[in-house]
Each structure stands twice: as structure tokens, then as C-alpha cells.
Image (cartoon, grey):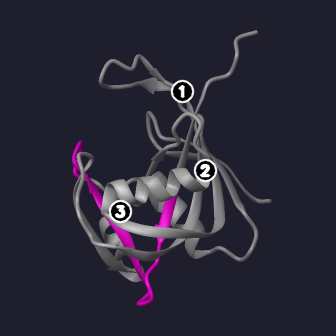
Amino acid sequence: MQMPVHIVAAGGFVENNQGEILLVKVRRDGDWVFPGGQVEVGENLIDGVIREVKEESGIDVIVSHLVGIFSNTATYEGHSGVKIVPTKVMFDFVCKPVGGELTTSDETSDSCWVSKEEVLDLVSAPALRTRYQAYLDYNGSINYMDYITRPEFELKLKRSV
């Protein structure tokens, strides 16, 4: 049996006191996204999301609570020498800003605060839209979803746990 390989990632829905959501624009494709990314070796999920938000946006955060766990079970050819991108498991957290200033990074070309109602006008990726809706619909139960993003987005499983 082959040992399973997964990418573990953490994302942050950062909401300020005005009810605005933090978005960053990815340099690679110009899409607006929520800050987050792969958890590094030896790093826990909470530290990972705090680091990713700071790196991508310049904002310091504290983590409030987990709202969703998502599996992207599609495998596909990667870029930058990656032959096959394995299954991804993503943990989305609600975060509160506690300092820092909006900035950009090697990965991001812009960062901004957007009203909750306008987020979906900017975020176009179906998987991210689905995860944002799970954040909006959060009722105290953790959302779990299994989806694929290629060849096109398909939600395979949705439930609360």
C-alpha cells in the first residue's frame, strides 16, 4: 500500500470591527482570495494561519475559532516543477486583526478590507466562494466539504460535524 500524501493548509477569514473581510490579490493569477496557505513542517495549524495572514497581508491576527474543514480530492499537474498536486486538506479559521498594516508580499499584489456583502463580487473561484458561504452560514457546527476543482468545480459532499 502506498502511503497517503496530503497538503495541509490553513486559511483565515479575517473580520475587522467594521464587519469587513480581509482579501489579498494573488500575483500568479490576479485572483482575490482569503489569506492562507500550506502549513510548514513542524508548524501547527494556528501558527500556520497566523503566519500566512501576516506574510500575505501585513496584518497580525489572533485566531477565534474553526469554521470549516475542506478536502480538495482532485489531483492534477502542478506548476514550478510539481508533477502531481496531491489531495489538499484545508482548515478555515475566523481571525481578528490585532495590529499590522496592509501591505503586499512576493505572493500578493494587493490587500484590502471589503464589506461582507461585496466579497463575492471579487472572489471568483467556486471553491473559495463555497468556503466563504460556509463562513457566512456558520452556526456553531463545523462545516465539512469534499470537492474537486478540476477539470471543473464539483461539490461531492457537504455536512456539519
Q: Which mark is residue 129?
A: none
Q: Residue furthest right?
A: 161
Q: Amino acid at mark 3?
A: Val
Q: Residue 15, how many percent across, how many down?
A: 46, 77
Q: Which residue matches tag 2?
A: 45
Residue range (magenta): 11-30
Q: In front of the other: label 3 or label 1?
A: 1
Residue at 44% from the left image edge and 75% from the top image edge: 97
Asked whether disc 3 touches disc 1, contact meaning CB atoms under 8 Å apart, the reply is no
Nearer-N-terminus badge (2/1): 2
Q: Position of residue 46 (x, y in %)?
A: 59, 56
Q: Secondary structure at mark 2?
A: helix
Q: Identify the mark nearer the N-term, 2 or 3.
A: 2
Task: Identify the residue at horizontal 23%, vertical 64% (top origin).
Answer: 103
Identity, as a three-letter code, of the amino acid under mark 1: Pro
Question: Magenta includes 147?
Answer: no
The answer to whether residue 7 is left or right of residue 146 is: left
Residue 52 lies, with reference to residue 141, above or below; the image says above
Identify the residue position indicated by label 1 in the image.
86
